[in-house]
Image (tube, grey):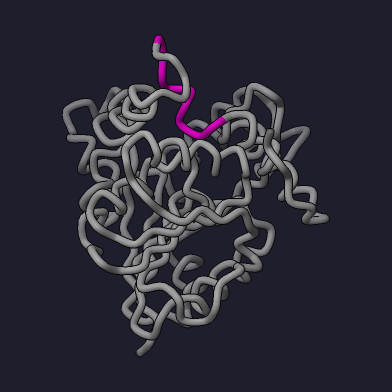
Amino acid sequence: MAQAIATGDHYKDEVQRQWDRDACGSQYVKGIEPDTLDWYLDVERYRYDHYGPWMPKLMEFAGHRGEKVLEVGGGMGTDHAQFAKSGAITTDLDLSSGHLEHAKRNFALRGLTGEFVHGDAENMPFEDGTFDVVYSNGVIHHTPDTARVVDEMYRVLKPGGKAIIMVYAENSLHYWRTLFYSLGIAQGRLERVSMGDIMSESVELSEHGSKPLVKVYTPKRLHNLFRRFEQRTIYQRQMVPEERPAMLRRVPVALLERIMGWNLIIKAQKPR
């Protein structure tokens, strides 16, 4: 039974309701018994073979053996397991107890070990300078006080530690074509609601009607969010083949996503 954290914040409550009942990534698995090793492995295959083939290398899953890696919002443990398999010492901090239960089960079925902590990224229950790496993929853009989350990441990193963080990109095909034009203009929803409302209702699909907060970023705003960090580098990725516009069907997806992909990834270092 999923246990919610009393945050006193509407958006955090929506995030918990969303992910406690609709595990992220599970909607792509068909015909396999849930909560089995094959089920978790099928989530993994879809994620890295179809959805994000760029992830394993760019996100450095194999690059932190022996280092202490904190993942903020590990979901079902898919990415988290990649760090653990490659020898990292892993900690998963998640606001969703439902996600944490999935991640624990995923690790147990794979024979992996890690630490799993139920907590709020805006108030991390860790000492200063604890981790070598803080990783988060598609999570902090759901937080009401995202700047506070980044400050907490900075605090818990060791001097010289590295942040690897993904947020949604405003300057992307998905934002302008799907969310703004198709939903906002063509369906007339912008006459009644804001883009924030459209994203909240449409980006994170839920069978239970949850509407978590969703934000988008430009590279400039993302740089500013991580301004306390050094050596900041931003990458743009994420487009599945079926999203490619017909007029650009001859252009490789791997090239298009670097120009108009849905994800911005920042890598940055805490000063030594």
Residue farthest top in this picture: 31
Residue 180 position (above or below residue 8): above
Q: Residue at x 47, y 66 (%)?
A: 222
Q: Residue at x 25, y 64 (%)?
A: 64
Q: Whole-percent x and y of residue 145?
A: 67, 64
User: 44 or 217, which lies in front?
Assistant: 44
Specify whether residue 185 is in view. Answer: no
Q: Whole-percent x and y of residue 171?
A: 44, 50
Residue farthest right in this picture: 8
- Is residue 29 inside the magenta stretch? yes
Classify residue 17 by image quadrant: top right
- Left or right: residue 26 versus residue 124 is left
User: 130 or 216, which lies in front?
Assistant: 130
Residue 158 position (above or below residue 175): below
User: 108 or 253, which lies in front?
Assistant: 108
- Left or right: residue 46 versus residue 14 is left
Q: Residue at x 61, y 69 (%)?
A: 125
Main secondary-structure element of the magenta-colored stretch: loop
Residue 162 position (above or below residue 191): below
Q: Which quadrant: the N terminus? A: top right
Q: Which quadrant: the C terminus? A: bottom left
Specify whether residue 162 is in view. Answer: yes
Q: Which contiguous range is marked in magenta?
A: 23-31
Q: Whole-percent x and y of residue 93?
A: 53, 56
- Left or right: residue 109 versus residue 104 is left
- Is residue 98 inside the magenta stretch? no
Q: Whole-percent x and y of residue 256?
A: 26, 41
